Image (tube, coloured by chain):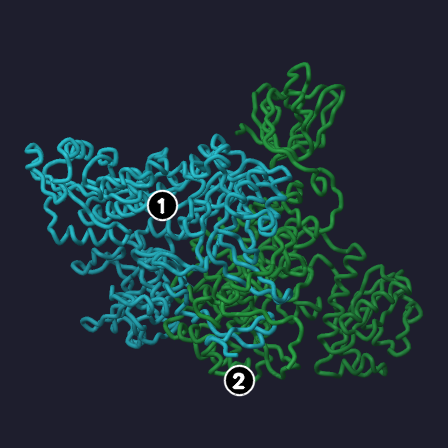
Chain colours: A green, B cyan
Amino acid sequence: MRSHYCGDLSEAHIDQEVTLCGWVNRRRDHGGVIFIDLRDREGLIQLVFDPEDSPENFRHAEQVRSEYVLQVKGRVRHRPEGTENPDLKTGKIEVLSQELVLLNASETPPFPVDEKLEVSEEVRLRYRYIDLRRPESLQRLRFRSEIIRQLRKFLDERGFLDIDTPVLTKSTPEGARDFLVPSRTHPGQFFALPQSPQLFKQLLMIAGVDRYYQMVRCFRDEDLRADRQPEFTQLDIETSFLHEDEFMGLMEEMIKELFATVLEVPLHTPFIRMPYAEALACFGLDKPDLRIPLRLVEVGDLMKMVEFKVFAEPAQDRDGRVAALRLPGGGKLSRKEIDDYTKFVAIYGAKGLAYIKVVERRRGREGLQSPILKFLPDEVIGAILDRTGAEDGDVIFFGADKASIVNEALGALREKLGHDHGLVEHGWRPLWVIDFPMFEWDETSSRWSALHHPFTSPKEEDLPLLEQDPGACRSRAYDLVLNGTEVGGGSMRIFRSQVQTQVFRLLGIGDEEAREKFGFLLDALKYGCPPHGGIAFGLDRLVMLMTGSASIREVIAFPKTQTATCPLTGAPGPVAEAQLRELGIRARKSTPEKG
Amino acid sequence: MRSHYCGDLSEAHIDQEVTLCGWVNRRRDHGGVIFIDLRDREGLIQLVFDPEDSPENFRHAEQVRSEYVLQVKGRVRHRPEGTENPDLKTGKIEVLSQELVLLNASETPPFPVDEKLEVSEEVRLRYRYIDLRRPESLQRLRFRSEIIRQLRKFLDERGFLDIDTPVLTKSTPEGARDFLVPSRTHPGQFFALPQSPQLFKQLLMIAGVDRYYQMVRCFRDEDLRADRQPEFTQLDIETSFLHEDEFMGLMEEMIKELFATVLEVPLHTPFIRMPYAEALACFGLDKPDLRIPLRLVEVGDLMKMVEFKVFAEPAQDRDGRVAALRLPGGGKLSRKEIDDYTKFVAIYGAKGLAYIKVVERRRGREGLQSPILKFLPDEVIGAILDRTGAEDGDVIFFGADKASIVNEALGALREKLGHDHGLVEHGWRPLWVIDFPMFEWDETSSRWSALHHPFTSPKEEDLPLLEQDPGACRSRAYDLVLNGTEVGGGSMRIFRSQVQTQVFRLLGIGDEEAREKFGFLLDALKYGCPPHGGIAFGLDRLVMLMTGSASIREVIAFPKTQTATCPLTGAPGPVAEAQLRELGIRARKSTPEKG
């Protein structure tokens, strides 16, 4: 039906007869002539309808409104001098229309496609098919498709097999709530939608597949935070007989090639590999944004003996931490600004935000401003200034509390200061965070929980710690962090059944429960399981970062809202009572039942 | 951890030091030396452990049993003359082992990997990770991955965007039962798993995506027949601004390229395009297997006036049919064989199976054998022999009944005869079936139902028939049939909202119901919907055909059984009462409730 895409036309096509199909982006009548910008997915082209050239054709063009669908035959020509549009790829040419076929009309769309009018997300999602006509929206989907293509290409070339795993499966324990699907043929029983294909990919390794990948939909029935979707896409990868260093190296090459081909950005490999403990010490977080040059500095050792209890007590506490964070040029922060940062860190549980402003360092104590100066001896002040590298005009903030609170509060403050004060460097700063602890102590349930998941292998040299000191046992897990966002997480897996059993027990999963939930994995581990490990990348998040989008909803064709609904189709919706009966379930009454 | 795959070694590696990882396929002790066949996904290699060479190494090798996981260093050498194994790719070489690391042990597997022992499907699926170690099982998954890769490559190169659509969505009306997912955040409401992304891909066309594809999981909660799965994978494609001829041509090229690259089989394009009416007339089915050279022949016009009522009545009936089917060489069929075929056609509702054996045609009536000869005049017999091209030694079968029964019975008989008598030609015989009727009359509900789906466009020239004679109205649908299996089905879609409304009404979908179920589509059609159409290929079935597998379960990594369960994970399974409460549902009691 067409010879070219509108947006692909160029001066190379001058004098050619072309047939185009597309949407009316805009119609203008000027000097007795009608100009129509016709749009397809490649761009715009200006059509000209001249009544002297073809009166009938012109009359058809008069009927045309925005978003009508047209097929147009015509001849490409230069625009008259002085009427070129340098903002448009096809701005030097136009098509003198010789024949117009109106393929379909359009009502006035709920919002204009050709203007950058702010429209509420609810309305945009409800009319997603209009929203996607906006070039920047469609561009994101194209970009996503291209990213997926490049990732697949890399993996295909290296012998990875693309294998799909079930969607209707058994509940897997990734720590989130499952979506359930009632079974009609087995009333009272349920499938679960996978939170990840973790166990299936491990089984594929046990089967000898050796290298597996899949772009796979995963499901978590969580209360949605800003950047979550109930269904999301993961690039899931698993390999056998590779050490983590080799595996991380391979994944680095993949990301490097992706950025080189899709963004034309060179990334330097190997990526930084930062132990978890160092990430917390320097950045307070296990996903540091390295574009921000600020760093936390340890000062606990200086504070053990000071009179100031707010510092001395956490400094003496085994679980406490006292840390400093210098903001260059922060000496000019107003009282109000400091108050606002104090409120900000309070969100993370910090009870206050002590600070020292450095006015003129060479004057010693006299050259500083701070409500806490009087509590600190000269040598402590001197050491703080030295360690933080303070210069005139800076401010130094302090966190002193349980280490977890200090880390969260100063970690968040560091990123906020970075953004507020324009300190975020340009570019891409990937790193691997490694050497995670296997377990963290959960105060609520008074037991160990897995920092990654229960199939993550301990480090070989830390195996004895499983019995002696689980909290000190490090795992073979690794997270890929990019500009402060975790884009991938993985590990070498447990491949010996007795280690798996030991870890289950430590996590409070009794042998009976383990057998019931993971019996098939425990069985499989007994029949010759190879050393193996892998990773899962959050594809939506990666695409979001690479496209500079504000939300993952922008890079998903038909996303759900933050209340997990689809304004377009109206899902979820009511179903017929007969359907429920067939499935062997009934809806509970929404009000509490009375005896 | 390794330098090569086992199966990749060849004489090119003679004298090289290699490190291999894999599974013990078999251990043999012979002449004081241990031979181990080590297996990885690329194949087998023979390892040699000589006690004189390395006693410690040899002692390790003595511990080794089938399916143990090893890492072995050694040197590649020629096998001694006379000990080569021509059945093995690596049969001319072996690896003299210098170092053996036992990576993992294995219990005795539930069935041997290295023997072609028949094992029940239930056991194979329960231990799928062992089953997949069998080279032919793994090979199917590799082949599937390769097919997917080639299809994607073709589409990527032609500007198709890979876009994923929701899994948690609204019930779509593909005619099958939906799987439902209760919404926790909206108690009493349900998501449905998609039977296909039909409406989403149409919306993407309305959005201007122009060319879309997706390898997509689809779900149907059907009672499972031999070759169905509750979840299956579809290659889903949609395009805008293409006529069906162009579109079918593009798809042909895709299939042609797939067969050329993956099977090294040349297919001839263009594929045959056969109207639905012709398919029924000649083959009785809308998915004829063209490898079988038998054809149905119309004889109804000859039978209108014969005395034999079994033939005359259907011949006079507007809905009846009388057809003949010649089996070359079938004259030697025994009474028992003919009885068996009679029973076979009875499955399809045929009340009998008349036949004429051609012994010696030149002798006329005398040269024939048949219980029905006496009912037929000479000129009718002569015409039958002429039309069927009967030769001495043939048998001619007859079907006479309602056309639908004759078609089903003779269509099935034709394929059975073809297989029973070795008439199935080698090779691949693709064809398009086109010109389907839009509707078929459903006797049960006394209304029209859609032969494809309600979004299929009528032929432009048949539009007036929507009102005048819906049964005569043909659609713009097309099915791709390969060796008797429908591997793809699609159509040009309705793109004008008033046609869509008209079709809904014909199908007995009232305006209110249409708005409730498809309101978003009807809305979208109003805002500039382009002419568009597409297709969906059953990927599992295509892979099954191309790998010559007996069932689609063979080409799915973790299939469900025919009772829709997974013997490996035990899905579906029971869930905690608390989970159901959170979802706002409860299980019905399995026994009828008592007042």
Image side of residue A433 versus residue B76, left or right: right
Picture coordinates of residue B461, whole percent (x, y): 48, 30
Observer-nearest residue: B542 or A105? A105
Observer-nearest residue: A402 or A90? A90
Q: Give me the residue at 20% from left, 58% from top.
A: B84
Q: Give me the residue at 30% from left, 38% from top.
A: B281
Residue sticking out furthest to the bottom: A468
Picture coordinates of residue B39, whole percent (x, y): 32, 63
User: Element under label 2?
Assistant: helix
Q: Against B4, is B375 above or below?
A: above
**Amino acid at dot 1:** Val
**Amino acid at dot 2:** Glu
Observer-nearest residue: B360 or B252? B360
Observer-nearest residue: A253 or A516? A516
In space, the residues marked 2 and 1 are separated at their CA atoms by: 53 Å
Q: Give me the residue at 56% from left, 66% from top.
A: A179
Q: Against B527, is A560 above or below?
A: below
Disc sitting over residue A467 in the figure: 2
User: Element under label 1?
Assistant: helix
Disc sitting over residue B262 in the figure: 1
